[in-house]
Amino acid sequence: MEGVQPDTAARAQTRPLTDRQRERRAGILKATNALLVRHGYDAVSMRAIAQAAGVAERTLFNIYSSKDALVATCARERTEGIIQEAWEKAADPGIGFVLSLCETLSWRTLEQPDVARALAPVLVQHADTVGLQDVYHRYVGRALDELARKGWLEQADIAMLTRLIGMRMVSAVALWAGRGIGDDALETHMRLAICEVLLPHARSDLHAWSQVEARRCVATLAAEPA
């Protein structure tokens, strides 16, 4: 994915899409995911995606500048939808969202394992193209800001911690995709990863919660069969 140009669709965000355009793009992303699962990244071409989606290849290139940009869009939109769902389901915008993020990301990953495994390498190898840091900043950054307002974190640490949490979530999914983490242990690994990020910086109730949760996660993983 070297030399990827910004996604044409991303550059056009200021122009609202018509219902027909939204439907067409949804069909393209669905077809792309299906082909990635069936054939893998290297074997999928823009021509094949266009045929599967029922659009002209030229139209596909007009919307997405390259296959790399299209696959990156698939990875970003899927992950953003999951994180938004976690935000909407959270019991509160602070620790509640942290727990909801791990639960929802794990559940949705295991719900469609073939899609998750097909997109995991893109999330790791081409993180800048996918642009997930913007998504994590929007949601995780907001949750950490809530914790900072309670005096449990330093405001100056939020950007760094948000980036670290995003990286650790992607790493957990990538390890799972490579079968380094079992299905039953995925959510626990995610919770432990967030505790590891927060503990050196957390204060007061957040520090106490992170310690207790980290110990629980370690004990749970230690009890997992090898």
Image (spheres, rainbow, N blue to C red):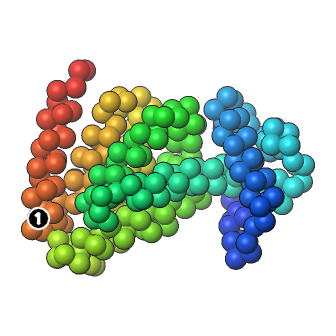
Q: Secondary structure at mark 1?
A: helix
Tell whether 130 sits left or right of 111.
right
Of the 4 image quadrants, the one containing the C terminus is: top left
**Horizontal and vertical percent position of residue 166:** 40, 57
Q: Where is residue 117 drawn, in percent x and y?
A: 53, 35
Residue at 89 percent of width and 54 percent of height? 58
- The location of residue 80, given as percent across then percent down, is 52, 56
Q: Camera-side residue: 102 or 199?
A: 102
Residue depicted at 32% across the width and 65% down the height? 93
Rendered image quadrant of residue 156: bottom left
Q: Residue at x 13, y 56 (%)?
A: 209
Which amino acid type corresponds to the residue marked 1 in the rendered image? Asp
- Vertical arrangement, residue 157 with respect to residue 89, above or below: below
Which residue occupies 9% across, 68% down?
Answer: 204
In the image, farthest residue toward the top:
225
Q: Vertical placement of 152 versus 188: above or below?
A: below
The residue that disc 1 covers is 205
Q: Using the image, determine if residue 31 lies above or below residue 202.
A: above
Q: Is residue 157 visible?
A: no
Question: Looking at the image, is 91 positioned above or below residue 56?
Answer: below
Q: Quadrant of residue 86?
A: bottom left
> Is 89 left or right of 40, judged from the image as shown?
left
Q: Is residue 57 left or right of residue 188?
A: right
